[in-house]
Amino acid sequence: MQIATQSISVAAADAIRAMIVDGTLADGNRINEVHLAKALEVSRTPLREGLMRLVTEGVVTTEPRRGFFVKPMTLDDFLELYAIRPILDPAALTMAGLPEAKSLDQLERINDAMLSARSPSRAIDLDDQWHRELLGHCPNSVLLDLIDQIIGRTRCYEHALFRETDNVWKAGDEHARIIAALRDGDLDAACAELKRNLQSGSEPIVNWLQQRTTDSGAQK
């Protein structure tokens, strides 16, 4: 598998994240940098940069003189993380208020691009861009920073969700309902739809995590 030359470290992080999600890199295992660099056809420097990106996401851990390890993806961690944004994002949208028409047009363009994305990573990038555009006028920078931190830490779980095209389309429909409510000037309805959007991915990810645990146990 060869990685495109542009943004090699980002592409490496995407590839490693996918390998963690599909179990190629198993929970708790030490990551062999030499073998991984060879498999991805990248040099050690961008590989390490990609791994450090995953450390900030909480997907990978690092230990001095021992290297990088795959952090187990657990149901408890997911439920704790996923419960936060349905609280934070509607609060940020309430503070931001109704967007201008040009911002709503931009939200529609981003949503259309997300629906046409050809990879889970690209769909997640556009989904994150959509939410940042939606909340961009929130005056509370601390709140926006907290949301950004949660976005990073849930990316690996979102990768599992957005591997299924139906889930991407479901998210797109939910985005469209939020935009429609904002065009109608109904901020409360938009916040309610936003909360539903941020909760709707929970069930398929929970099912995936439970199946992943079952499969892992069966292989031991």
Image: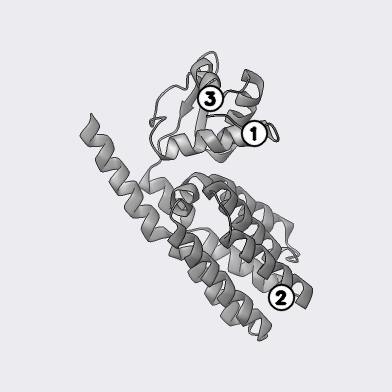
Q: Are marks 1 and 3 in contact (CB under 8 Å)?
A: no
Amino acid type, mark 2: Gly
Q: Are marks 2 and 1 in contact (CB under 8 Å)?
A: no
What residue would you read off at disc 2?
A: 97
Answer left or right for 170 relative to 212.
right
Q: Relative to the observer, which residue lies in front, 55 or 87? A: 55
Examine the rendered structure and indicate whether residue 168 appears above or below residue 12: below
Examine the rendered structure and indicate whether residue 32 appears above or below residue 61: above
Q: Residue at x 66, y 63 (%)?
A: 110
Amino acid type, mark 1: Ala
At numbered mark 3, what does the secondary structure look like: helix, strand or loop? strand
Upstream in sequence: badge 3 or badge 2: 3
Q: CA distance from mark 2 to mark 1?
A: 40 Å
What residue would you read off at disc 3?
A: 62
Q: CA distance from mark 3 to mark 2?
A: 41 Å
Answer left or right for 130 relative to 85.
right
Q: How is the image coloured?
A: one colour
Task: Please state, as top left, top right, bottom left or bottom right, where the C terminus lies in the image.
Answer: top left
Upstream in sequence: badge 2 or badge 1: 1
Q: CA distance from mark 1 to mark 3?
A: 26 Å
Q: Where residue 36 sits in the image (x, y, percent)?
A: 51, 22
Amino acid type, mark 3: Thr
Which numbered mark, 1 or 3, is in the foreground of this view?
1
Q: Residue at x 40, y 31 (%)?
A: 24
Q: Residue at x 46, y 64 (%)?
A: 199
Which numbered mark, 2 or 1, is in the foreground of this view?
1
Which disc, if any, is residue 4?
1
The answer to whether residue 122 shows anywhere in this view is yes
Q: Where residue 164 sits in the image (x, y, percent)?
A: 43, 55
Upstream in sequence: badge 1 or badge 3: 1
- The crowding category of the residue bearing disc 2, from other C-alpha atoms within 10 Å (few below 14, some 14 to 19, many at least 20), is some
Q: Residue at x 60, y 59 (%)?
A: 114
